[in-house]
Amino acid sequence: MALTLITFEGRTPVVDPCAFVAPGARLIGDIEIGPDSSIWYNCVLRGDVNRIRIGARTNIQDGSVIHVDSPRAGDKDGFATIIGDDVLIGHLAMVHGCILHDRAFVGLGSIVMDGCAIESDAMLAAGAMLTPGKTIPSGQLWAGRPARYVRDLSEAELEGQRLGVAHYVELAKRHAAAIAGG
């Protein structure tokens, strides 16, 4: 199964040559992916009605969906999805029309809805749902459906996130080599 890049209404995804996009991933429209980022197997990134920007060393794990919200009457900009550097997004996450600042963490199976923000060094727990317009402040863990503040993150947890970023940068290189046959 090959990677699919689809030009939509004149906008073609732009992927840094150092990024890894796994076979089976689908990238559509106005998307930019930074260096050493990884988009894993069977992810869908659809920048058809707004833009998606992904920084450096960010990973979006298998089966995740990244989308945007359309501009419309009363909201001329809609909601783009802006994902910073060193962001970890777990398997099967749904990220829609929001901002994930540098070093944000989205747990597996989580949902981040329109107009939300996860600040730097903040975490949305696995299976949580961050409802429209909410912000997780830096250094906090939120969990539940709907997500609510649970506690502050420890230095050990923040270090674990940094190690996770480095792990995924290296793992992506190994997968790229295996796909290339070497």
Image (cartoon, helix red, strand yellow):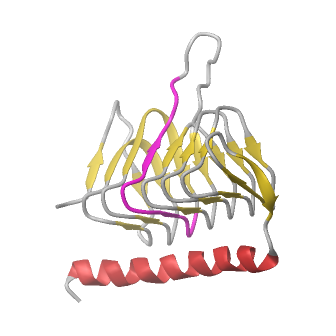
Where is residue 16 drawn, in percent x and y? 45, 64
Q: Residue furthest top?
A: 73
From the viewer's side, name the closer residue of 17 and 28.
28
The vertical placement of 78 against 4, above or below, is above
Residue drawn at 75 percent across, 63 percent down: 121
In the rendered structure, the answer to whether residue 69 lies left or right of residue 154 reads left
From the viewer's side, name the closer residue of 156 and 16.
156
Query: Is-magenta flag for residue 164?
Result: no
Q: Residue furthest bottom?
A: 182
Query: Is-magenta flag for residue 63?
Result: yes
Residue drawn at 64 percent across, 47 percent down: 144
Where is residue 20 drawn, in percent x and y? 39, 69
In the rendered structure, the answer to whether residue 14 lies left or right of residue 5 reads right
Total labels drawn: 0
Quarter of the image for residue 179 reads bottom left
The vertical placement of 111 against 142, above or below, is above
Residue drawn at 50 percent across, 78 percent down: 169
Q: Which segment did they paint magenta?
A: 56-70
The vertical placement of 82 against 37, above or below, is above
From the viewer's side, name the closer residue of 131 and 178.
131
Quadrant of the rendering where the C terminus is positioned? bottom left
In the rendered structure, the answer to whether residue 50 lies left or right of residue 83 reads left
Majority secondary structure of the magenta segment? loop
Where is residue 118 drawn, in percent x and y? 70, 50
Residue drawn at 56 percent across, 59 percent down: 107
Quarter of the image for residue 21 reads bottom left
Quadrant of the rendering where the N terminus is positioned? bottom left
Where is residue 140 drawn, in percent x and y? 79, 58
